[in-house]
């Protein structure tokens, strides 16, 4: 079993201390998104992966992937995903590895995120994220990582 980094509950009672037999990586989530939507601007893919993590914490009570999300000037970034798309404006499914199998709950989370955010422009998503507390707080505090507890607290209260 592989342990996901423990995070606190953010005070809302949802325990996000989890163990997963084979964690789905952020690369797999990104590849799944690209298979659903086709080629995307690299920055938009980062934002959609971010929202998948946020809503998985709220809806599933656990992270969808174990990698950290950093608060960078252009928005939330998963460094491992960034390394695969560095220097590219558009990314497609060939940029990322073939996605590993994703369980039904994760597929549903991704589908719901894409149903709401998928048709929005990168600019629209950037403006939205810059108004939301997890990214604002991490950016203002100079933190590099957006904590799961901040995501769970903010999105859990929407």
Image (cartoon, rainbow, N blue to C red):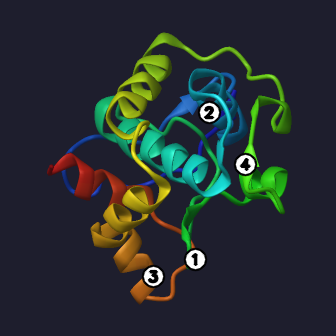
- Please tell me whether mark 4 or mark 3 is closer to you in this view: 4
> In the image shown, does 80 or 96 lie closer to the viewer?
96
Quadrant hosting residue 98: top right
- Please tell me whether mark 1 or mark 3 is closer to you in this view: 3
Q: Count up the numbered dots.
A: 4
* Residue at x 37%, y 58% (from the top left corner): 124
The residue indicated by pointer 3 is 139
Determine contact: label 4, label 1, CB under 8 Å.
no
The residue indicated by pointer 4 is 90
* Residue at x 41%, y 18% (from the top left corner): 108
Residue 33 is situated, as x and y percent measured from the top left of the image, at 59, 30
First of labels 1, 2 by sequence position: 2
First of labels 2, 3 by sequence position: 2
- The residues tagged by marks 4 and 1 sit, at their Cα atoms, a distance apart of 25 Å
The residue indicated by pointer 1 is 144
The residue indicated by pointer 2 is 29
């Amino acid at each position: 079993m592989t342990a996901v980094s423990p995070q606190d509950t953010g005070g809302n009672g949802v325990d996000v201390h989890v163990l997963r037999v084979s964690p789905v990586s952020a690369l797999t989530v990104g590849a799944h998104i690209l298979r659903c939507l086709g080629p995307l601007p690299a920055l938009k893919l980062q934002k959609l992966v971010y929202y998948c993590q946020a809503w998985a914490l709220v809806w599933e009570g656990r992270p969808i992937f174990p990698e950290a999300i950093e608060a960078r000037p252009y928005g939330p970034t998963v460094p491992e995903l960034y390394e695969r798309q560095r220097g590219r404006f558009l990314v497609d499914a060939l940029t990322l590895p073939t996605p590993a199998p994703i369980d039904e709950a994760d597929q549903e989370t991704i589908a719901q995120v894409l149903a709401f955010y998928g048709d929005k422009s990168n600019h629209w998503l950037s403006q939205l994220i810059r108004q939301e507390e997890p990214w604002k707080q991490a950016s203002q505090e100079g933190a590099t990582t957006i904590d799961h507890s901040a995501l769970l607290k903010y999105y859990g209260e929407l």
